[in-house]
Amino acid sequence: MIFTNASPFGVIVRFAVSGIIAAGVMAADAMAQQKQPSPGSAKALFGAVQLPSNQESQPIGFYAKGCMAGGVALPADGPTWQVMRMSRNRRWGNPATIALIEKLSRDARQDGWPGLLIGDMSQPRGGPMFNGHASHQIGLDFDAWFRPMPAQRLTIAERETYPFVSLLQKNKFLTVDDRLWTQAHARLLMRAASYPEVERIFVNPAIKKKMCDTWKGDRTNLGKIRAQYGHDEHFHVRLHCPPGATACKPQAPVAPGDGCDKSLAWWFSPAPWAKPKPPVPGAPPPKPPREVMVSDLPAACAAVLHAPSISPAKAKAYGVEGAPSASRAQPSRNANVPQAEVPVQEDQPSAE
């Protein structure tokens, strides 16, 4: 590697210990406490829908600005996966996403990974979420925990409180905890990156650095694994737009190479952690960002939002009969909420 965590970044390390690590916890707590979205906003409307539209499956728009027609639910339990935080009603995706999760969970057993714990996918009709993500809007993103699936089947109640486990050391700046990190984690990430359907995978910068420093196998797909804020408790898989999905807007491809270059070194420089510039004295305070409305999304999303839902029989088959709306099922202040996903320079706009 071309960089280290040593003395050149001593100031950053001290700042991180006292501020950045704590800020991640505060950010997660703030997400759980933020006010409800305004009535009529895209977050409120898409978050209140309990079932997918009865339409042909297709992703519409961009990962961070769109919606999903004809969403499909990942079964709560499979032979090699369990869905977590069921109350959030975010286990919906494009059929390609469902198939990829099932395949990855099955194939990963060859790598010593017993099964996947699946976090957020998309809402029933995609669209902006109340908290936790800027993306996950078109059914082509999903989160998988870095904690392996336990041997026992967790109850629905247990899945609401089963804790995340960070792979980072708590008292060091962007450093993986070697007591927790295993080669099975590395093999799982490279297995996911090997699939041609996978467009990129987001992990914490420290985890990307660990992969760069220690992966001894074929590095062809290592470049798909991208550094991003948070993502120390889970990794985020993004799929390409499926063939024939003409309404899906693709993301610019990842840069050639393994990604173990200056784009990763940037995370270990002062730049990502610099405090914002203070306001100009006497200047009016900046206006708060305007909430996203349905009219800001692709035009087809209004039709998706108002389309008829799937039949009660199909909903029952998915196990979502009487599912709470996402707006009523937000985690409490003390729930285990992953860190906010924040877009960064190379993956803008709204990579996450």
Image (cartoon, rainbow, N blue to C red):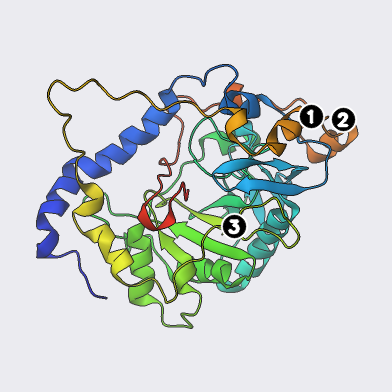
> Are dots 2 and 1 in contact, CB under 8 Å?
yes
Q: In which quarter of the image is residue 320?
A: top right
Q: Earlier in the sequence, mark 2 or mark 1?
A: 2
* Residue sitting at x 33%, y 75%: 213
Q: Which of 114 and 100 is in front in this view?
A: 100
Coordinates of residue 184 in the picture (x, y in percent): 49, 69
Residue at the spot of label 1: 321
* Residue sitting at x 90%, y 34%: 313
Residue at the spot of label 3: 250
In this orientation, does residue 243 appear?
A: yes
99 with respect to 12 (left or right): right
Q: Earlier in the sequence, mark 1 or mark 3?
A: 3
Please, is residue 38 above or below residue 192 in the view? Answer: above
Nearer the camera: disc 3 or disc 2: 3
How would you rate the neighbour count of disc 3 (Cα within 10 Å): few for under 14, some for 14-19, many for 20 or more?
A: some
Classify mark 3: helix, strand or loop. Answer: loop
| Amino acid type, callout 1 | Glu
| Amino acid type, callout 2 | Pro
